[in-house]
Image (spheres, grey):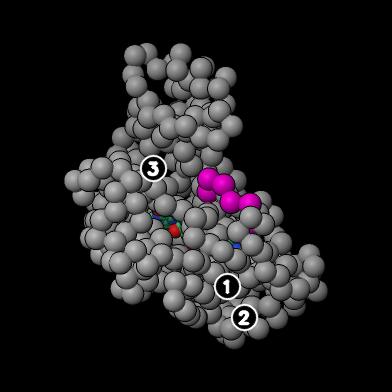
């Protein structure tokens, strides 16, 4: 276990933003993770758990408490059953499963961060989400003060949400178990239109697994969604806003403001409609690269807010508020941030 005091947090986030932690503990075993959490809880000390820092917006004042960085390792594959330690690098784990010829998480290639964070917001991309393959999550329950195993149903997964995100101070994920598929070198059925187009297949068709993996990585890289330290378009937290899910009534009101334009619309549960945050931002006048300060929209994707170097969290939030308010004025739709904010609010 490694302990530092007054440790800068910005280098531990993909946005490279945020002030220092009063105490930073890096834990490399489950026992160290649990001991650190217990110790902080017993002392009534504020605790922030971080993995790869790729979905975090930390305030410029930093964190006045213990930051626990989970750096545990463990990749155990038994047939099609995979168990990952929370600290495993997600993108590397995906690459390894594809290398073993297993389907189920191949469209989640290149997503930054740790395996332990994937159930938190039910990580998803290109028609796949971890909720489809996670069987169990082993977590330390800070309320019950014991390690628990939650089934997929108990994780209450929904779009970019879960039981863990709903109770952010309760669970620390230790291990995640997945059931993958041996589809004889083939991928899962392609669900996403852009991927199907790129591969020249119909939706629901399977393709060569390695080709599916590489296609997604290529699409992501073209949008600045694969980390590259030399490319400021990737100094982001990925998509900054979730795609709005509108009730039937909200959707009617939205349609009335479109002035003949056609907005993307996808059916969502409970008679709701999901539209595209990227489309709304673009149509509200915030194109790629928008902004003149040290924080701007990515030049490759309107949904990523980026640090061009030298930005502060205040700069980033000012841009985020301008965009949120501009979309609200133009379309009456309230954008909600996807990354977790620490010590600050949008
Ligand atoms: C370039 C880029 C592209 C991205 N693309 C996608 C995408 O396509 N789809 C997508 O869903 N996301 C995407 N993201 C967001 C991000 O990568 C994911 O949300 C990722 O799972 C976050 O992992 P992390 O380890 O970096 O979490 P962190 O940023 O460290 O933490 C995020 C939240 O999870 C909590 N947390 C972290 N680890 C644990 C744990 N072990 N137990 C309990 N809580 C924990 C933290 O407390 C915090 O609340 C992208 C981000 C970037 C920068």
In the picture, the quarter occupied by the N terminus is bottom right
Q: Is residue 158 magenta?
A: yes
Q: Nearer the viewer, residue 207 or 159?
A: 207
Q: Is residue 44 magenta?
A: no
- Name which quarter of the figure residue 167 lies in: bottom right
Tell me which numbered mark, 1 or 3, is placed earlier along the sequence: 1
Q: Secondary structure at mark 3?
A: loop
1 vs 3, front mark: 1
Residue 151, visible in the rendered structure? yes
Please state the extent of the stretch shown in magenta in the rendering: 155-160
Dot 3 corresponds to which residue?
303
**Inter-mark Cα distance, 2 to 1:** 9 Å
Main SS of residues in magenta:
loop
Q: Secondary structure at mark 2?
A: helix
Q: Residues within 10 Å of mark 3 (few under 14, many from 20)?
A: many
Furthest residue toward front: 184
Q: Where residue 72 sits: x, y (%)?
A: 53, 79
Dot 1 corresponds to which residue?
175
Q: Which mark is residue 30?
A: 2
Q: Where residue 136 sits: x, y (%)?
A: 60, 66
**Inter-mark Cα distance, 3 to 2:** 35 Å
Tell me which numbered mark, 2 or 1, is placed earlier along the sequence: 2
């Amino acid at each position: 276990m490694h302990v530092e005091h007054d440790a800068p947090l910005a280098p531990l986030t993909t946005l490279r933003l945020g002030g220092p932690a009063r105490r930073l503990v890096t834990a490399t075993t489950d026992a160290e993770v649990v001991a650190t959490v217990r110790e902080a809880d017993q002392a009534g000390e504020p605790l922030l758990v971080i993995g790869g820092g790729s979905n975090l917006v930390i305030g410029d004042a930093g964190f006045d408490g213990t930051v626990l960085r989970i750096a545990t390792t463990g990749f155990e594959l038994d047939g099609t059953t995979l168990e990952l330690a929370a600290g495993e690098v997600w993108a590397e784990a995906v690459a390894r499963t594809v290398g073993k010829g297993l389907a189920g998480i191949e469209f989640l290639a290149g997503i930054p961060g740790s395996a332990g964070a994937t159930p938190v917001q039910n990580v998803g991309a290109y028609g796949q989400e971890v909720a489809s393959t996670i069987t169990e999550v082993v977590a330390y329950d800070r309320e019950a003060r014991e390690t628990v195993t939650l089934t997929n149903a108990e994780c209450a997964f929904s779009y970019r949400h879960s039981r863990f995100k709903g109770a952010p101070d309760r669970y620390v994920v230790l291990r995640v178990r997945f059931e993958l598929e041996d589809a004889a070198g083939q991928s899962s059925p392609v669900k996403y239109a852009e991927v199907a187009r790129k591969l020249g297949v119909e939706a629901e068709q399977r393709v060569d697994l390695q080709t599916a993996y590489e296609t997604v990585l290529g699409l992501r890289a073209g949008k600045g969604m694969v980390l590259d330290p030399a490319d400021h378009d990737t100094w982001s937290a990925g998509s900054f806003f979730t795609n709005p899910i509108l009730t039937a009534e909200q959707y009617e009101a939205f349609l009335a403001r479109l002035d003949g334009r056609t907005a993307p619309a996808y059916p969502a549960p409970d008679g709701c409609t999901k539209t595209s945050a990227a489309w709304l931002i673009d149509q509200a006048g915030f194109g790629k690269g928008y902004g003149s300060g040290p924080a701007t929209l990515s030049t490759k994707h309107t949904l990523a807010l980026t640090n061009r170097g030298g930005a502060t969290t205040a700069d980033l939030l000012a841009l985020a508020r301008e965009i949120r308010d501009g979309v609200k004025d133009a379309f009456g739709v309230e954008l909600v941030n996807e990354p977790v904010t620490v010590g600050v609010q949008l």
